[in-house]
Amino acid sequence: MPIPAPSPASLLGDAIPAGSPYWLRINGVWVQIEGVVPSTAVGSERARSSVVTEGGNRYEQRAREVRRTWEWSLPHAAAPHVAVARVAAESEADVWLMADPVAGLNMLPPRSCFGTTLPAMLCGDVPLATFAGGETVTGRVRGGVSTTLSGWSDAAAATTILTATYPGGVATVAAAGGTAQASASFVPTTDGEVSIVVADGAWSTTGLMLTEGAAPVGWTAGERMPCKVVVDDPGDVLTMFHSGAWRHDYSITLREIG
Amino acid sequence: MTVWAKTPDLYTTPEVRLTSDGAPWLADAAVQSWQVERELVGSTLPGNIRARSGLSIGDASVVVAVESGTLTPWSRDTARHVTVGSTARLFVEADDGDTLDLGAWLIDPTSGNLTSRETQVDLTEAQYTGRKTPAALPPRSTASLPVDPVWMVARLSEQAGFHGAPVPVASAFIDLPLDGGFEGRNGLPPASVDGLDGWGVLPGDVVVGTTGTGNLTIAADPTAAETWKSGGSVYLTLNVVGEMRVLDVAQAWKVVVDAAAGTVGVCNTLDGTVATTPFTPGLSADWPTRMQVEIQRPTSPGGISEWASLRARARSAPDAAWSAWAEDATAVAEQNAGIATTYLLLGQDFDGVTVTPADPGQIAAVQLTTAADAALWAPATAHLKPLGGEVQIPYIPPADDVWTAVQSIAGANLAAVHVDRDGIEQVLDRDDLAGANTTGEVTDIGVEWTDLPWTLDPADSADRLEVAALVPALQEATATATTTPAPELWRAEEVIEVPAGGRLVTLDVEVEGRAGEGVFTSFVTPADLDTDPTLASRFSVVCHATGRDGSGALSVVDKFSISARLLSPSRLQLRFRNTGTVPLYLVDANGEPCVIVRARRVASFETPHVMERGVPAAEATNALSVDLGPYVQRPEDVESIADYLWARVAGAPAFKVSSVQVRLDWSHDIGKVLRLVHSRTGLEAKALITKVAYDGAAGEITQSLDLVLLPFVWRDFDAHWSGSTWSAFDARWAGAQWADFDSETY
């Protein structure tokens, strides 16, 4: 059964799309990449080293940031399926990757969702250290997509705990009262950064989540999306040749950079 | 505020950055990997006695990359145009923005290529710039006293930009750093001393000062403080411990400052009652013992116009409020009433002061200025310590550069000088290098170190020690003594030609093996010698003729001038001017060169003074020779150095530890003393870190140390038994034999 050619991307669509979870932003436009099989390997790399002393004590050092690698496989695909990837491989400008599973959960960088102050606050099922007041956290959003910022706090009801400055406006999150999750939604006008300021006060805030769509119940860790990637030139195995019906097994590697 | 100390068991490595104001191409560059190595080098360090002496200059190498494009020396984009030679800062940055400097650097050769983004930047420690400056010690006044060797280190360090006492300021008319000598800086007068004789570091401060019971008298140039005559102020800024009395040299008034009690007082006569007001001492974080006293002669408010009382106020930090004025109320009242018993005449010069610290007291860094300059409080960039001994004639070989001279002087006195990570020059004296000033930070080898590689070398011990020093042979005479010839400093070996035309010709001469003080600036010529032949042996001599072989007019007095001055004790500068129409040759009637420069004092460093320890030379199998050069000048100082060295090389050698990788601890730096313990093998030893090397990349920072072993000293024994009495010690060993004591298992 022939695989349908990819449909043009919808910039202003609100609903979470069915099909491939991957989107690439090329030349300022988000394009959904069809044809990627579900079993995609996502590798993580974080530089680390360890020192073992004479007495057997081990000390570990690690780098602050972790970077991921995606291995996409597109079997029985046609050339149009990898047209966007080829453009991305040649592109001199930045290429961004978005994965829908992450978009629907938490797009913030992993360390930006919580602070370092103890005692911890229970966010859903996860105890997280809280922010010291006044800290700023940065995430990225897509233009035209409804995005929700949420966090846990023990402030009194209606106290502003978070202020988000996004392309096109400012949104605030007001506490719900008790130790509970509170959220606010907004729609950015363009792709860009959102700067989230944790309000300073006699309460604690933690467990931030930045989600496309409604906020999930319970806290999940951030996975830093959208992220800048470099796309390798697609690998190609020509599997079926018949005039007009060429089919290839493509493999594309994307590496997170920045 | 990050505490830069031992890193935790799981350590997220911080960012390392390289920035430079003079190199904009580094602003966008990210550091990929880096290596830093800083080493303390000294030929007389314990365990390193036979090591070749070198200079303690660190080096580093950093690989950087820019995100967009390659760095090249031909790039037209300033953000990618590589330049070298500027100062750079290599530092570690923690999450909270706190930084730890890894030294002060200069950008050395930098290399890269087009196929990779990596550019390698080599760095060398910034004090290397001192190497380009010829070292010079300032000329000293007549009747100069011997100095502690650290005075020489201080003057040379100032040439390289490191100041122990606050920097000289333009408004100063008295400037006495008192860092090993009683000389003034910038040609200002020295102090004469009565009773003060020791040198020590002031508590809480890092400046060297004089100690003892006595006083300093400083005569000022009377025209220097002109404003004081008509109601202005002079500012006395100095570091003092205890009470200090400042007396007018003419003994007409006194100001008394008590740093312990926090009062400043003034009296218009020498013996009258002192009127005091309080002030708060110790407010300056950089200088806990420094204070500034403003001494003012306000013009008479009424009454007789030529009288004035005296008032003074003090403060102990540049931004602290001044105390209230201390004023002699009796004097003011009498002055207003026209009773002339306790007044000062307006128009009286500021002749100078006598500063007397309390008994015993310490004073340092004395500066008298006509303005309250903020630079008087600038933090020190060198932490100096007295090195011990006395230098009669400060001398450095003429060809030495600044940093070489500093380390030669330190090395000869068994000390070490290095620049620490923050760019502050540190002196480690003999006691520091022996570990006598600390019991060391306890370090368990099994927990902190990956291994303990040790080397035991019989060459580190010796059965015979020879210590040689060039003790100066001093000749001294004044020009007025007609029977004593003045010593000769230098004489010309080649014919000097002075061209016609009136241009000033300068000739810099290096005088090997001799140091001069008080060179006679004017010269006698054969015409002068006709009237008094004894002048030839008492003054500098020059002969000049119009013919190279000595023919022609021998004396063309009004067309030729010559003067001499000392740039440094062993570097002489001659200046000639010939306003005639023919060139002149400085030869005598026989055509031999004839320029002889004499000085009031000349020391020649030719005869080595040798101290021996151990077996005679014929029987020695492992002899050690140490040359202290001209830097140690008294036989008793040579003897104490010989004893110190002999105690370290006689007997069995101690093991050395080199290049051991340790758990990353940011507080490790050269000069730190560790106390090593290892329970499994029973090790207990003290060691001095002499080299720290870092190798860093993503997620990995390794640290390696080189150490030398230190013998235990009294302080360690004392700390171990701290709190115990002799009775407890005695009871502990009751009934024991020597063997039990020795075995440590009793």
Image (cartoon, coloured by chain):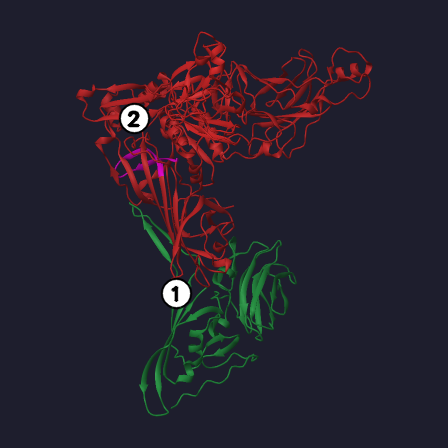
Chain colours: A green, B red
Residue B692: x %, y % from top left: 37, 42
**Residue at image mark 2:** B626
A159 inside magenta stretch: no
Q: Secondary structure at mark 1?
A: strand
Q: Chain of mark 1?
A: A
Give the residue at x 59% y 54%.
A133
Amino acid type shown at disc 1: Ser
Q: Residue at x 22, y 33 (%)?
A: B457
**Which secondary structure class fits the magenta region best?**
strand
- Residue B398 left/right relative to B611: right
Tag nearer the camera, 1 or 2 = 2
The answer to if B684 sits in the magenta stretch is yes
Q: Which residue is mark 1?
A: A44
Instruction: Work out which quarter of the rendered image holds the N terminus of chain A and state it.
Output: bottom left
Which image quadrant for residue A230?
bottom left
- The magenta segment: B671-690
Q: Quadrant of residue B638?
A: top left
**How many numbered markers are drawn?**
2
Q: Amino acid at mark 2?
A: Val
Residue neighbourhood size for the residue with mark 2, other residues' Cα within 10 Å, grouped as few (<14), some (14–19), many (≥20): some
The answer to whether residue B121 is seen in the rendering is: no
Q: Position of residue A162 (x, y in %)?
A: 60, 62
Residue B145 or residue B132, whichever sits in front:
B132
Q: Residue at x 51, y 58 (%)?
A: B78
SS at mark 2?
strand
Give the residue at the far front of this rendering: B552
